[in-house]
Amino acid sequence: MRKIVSAMLLWSAMLPVAAQQPLSLDSCRALALRNNKQVNAAKFKQEIALALRKAAKTKYLPKVDAVGGYQYFSESISLLSKDQKDALNHLGTGVTAAAGGNLSGFISNLVAQGVISPSAASQISNVFNQVSSPIAGFGNQIGQDIVNRLETNTHHIWGGAVVVRQPLYMGGAITALNRMAELNESVAENDANAKRQATLYSVDQAYWLVVSLKQKQQLANSYLALVQKLSDDVQKMFKEGVATKADGLKVDVRVNEAEMQVTQVEDGLALAKMLLCQLCGLPLEERVSLVDEQQSPSTIHLDAQPQIVADKALANTSRPELRMLQNIVDLTKQSERLVRAIYLPHVLLTGGYFASNPNMFNSFERKLAGTWNVGVLVQVPVWNWFEGTYKVRAAKAATSFAQMELSEAQEKISLQISQCQFKVKEAHKRLVMARKSIHSAEENLRCATLGFKEGVIESTDVLAAQAAWQKAKSQEIDAEAEVKLSQVNLQKALGVLQY
């Protein structure tokens, strides 16, 4: 229901001035929250923090990467050395030469032993020489074929891989990062609340300034009417000879002063309305009217004023500035955990698929093929010259510093709340005293005016009574605005200033 009412108020506040109703305080607040650049910037910061928190959650999930490429090499990968290639290319020649040498020695031994005759040995040698050439050629061909088959042809290489990495243990770094992301989101939210409260506070101050100046404008016009009426009466009395010219000059001086006061109040009211328009995001030349402008100070009933309980414990949980400082303390603690995690063992589960052309897993076949793989990667820091120890000490010192700032801010806010409490009580007392003074000033003015008409009181006494009446009414207007603003100040000090 509250959201519907707020939407209606905002819609009505955006209507053209010609058809626009007087703006209430809630309407001005809605306009300011909608159009304030700092508030809108804080909303973008919240969106950024939310996106970063979601990104931090992905650290728990496995990561998949794909990579591919092409490379040209001037030399191919060789499985044989140059000497081995040369030996295989002359395989037949080497075998027949060795066989021929061995056969010649063997035949000579047989001839020497008388097993065969020299003529038979000569015939055997002739037969071997006839068949050695074809055998040598056939052997060389076989060797060359072996060399060719072992050629890898790896001048052009295409390759690709898909790699999967799953963190198993990172020393608590992922948990710390996620907690820091959540805290950053909380910082952005508290910053937005602080911006909203500051905007509402500025709007309330500008609103009640316009209301008080409008009432002072009415008071200035009333005072001007009084002194003009007195001036007319003195002029009549001067013509009848019962007043002096000096009396008329004194009253004329007061008329001029009253006219100057009207001009000053009107200028101040115009500037105050321009400030309110700027805060509400309206054009500065917009002619706006406020609901409370037409109300007199006597409409405020002190018994009906909301009494805010100044609970300092409530301020510790509601004040956005304190919550932000607490977030900073928590962030420094998580930063300490993150620094410590860097120097702890890390364990990763890895896996993937690798493919290449030529296929290294099948004798460099000119075909794209590959294989699956899985493994575990462990990283253990061994020695870093106490770098981790120093960084952990620095993180602990940052935590202590943040805690000290939080404690100091709590003390200052407690003092601020106490001051605001005294201001609220003082504003109420001042309004009560101002209303009592008005009764006295009105009675004094009535008696002075009646005495002047009866001729027993001089015009200077009437002027003094009118000035006292104006001062009392002005004090009542100031006291009324102070009552309103003191309540707003206390709400802001407690962190409960909301729309």
Image (cartoon, grey):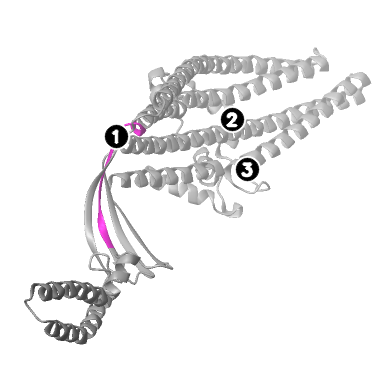
Q: For the residue carrying disc 1, how many other residues have a C-alpha within 10 Å: few (<14), some (14-19), or many (20+)?
A: some
Which residue in the structure is indicated by mark 2? Answer: 296
Query: Circle 2 — which element?
Result: loop
Q: Is residue 82 magenta?
A: no
For the residues marked 3 and 2, what is the alpha-carbon distance in whole angstroms? 26 Å
Nearer to us in this view, 288 or 323:
323
Which residue in the structure is indicated by mark 3? Answer: 278
Q: Quadrant of residue 308?
A: top left
Q: For the residue carrying disc 3, how many other residues have a C-alpha within 10 Å: few (<14), some (14-19), or many (20+)?
A: some
Query: Circle 3 — which element?
Result: helix
Which numbered disc, 1 or 3, marks the residue closer to the eye?
1
Q: Amino acid at mark 3?
A: Gln
Q: Which is the main secondary structure of the residues drawn in magenta?
A: strand
Q: Quadrant of residue 238?
A: top right
For the residues marked 1 and 3, what is the alpha-carbon distance in whole angstroms? 57 Å
For the residues marked 1 and 2, what is the alpha-carbon distance in whole angstroms? 74 Å
Q: Earlier in the sequence, mark 3 or mark 2?
A: 3
Quarter of the image with the N terminus is top left
Q: Is residue 366 visible?
A: no
Q: Earlier in the sequence, mark 1 or mark 2?
A: 2
Nearer to us in this view, 473 or 360:
360
Quarter of the image with the C terminus is top left
Q: Residue 182, position in %: x, y?
A: 36, 37
393 shown above or below 62 = above
Q: Residue at x 44, y 38 (%)?
A: 188
Question: In the displayed image of the protein, which residue is found farthest to the top?
Answer: 456
Q: Earlier in the sequence, mark 1 or mark 3?
A: 3
Q: Residue at x 40, y 39 (%)?
A: 185
The boundaries of the magenta stretch are: 341-354
160 shown above or below 178 = below
Nearer to us in this view, 90 or 52:
90
Which residue in the structure is indicated by mark 1? Answer: 345
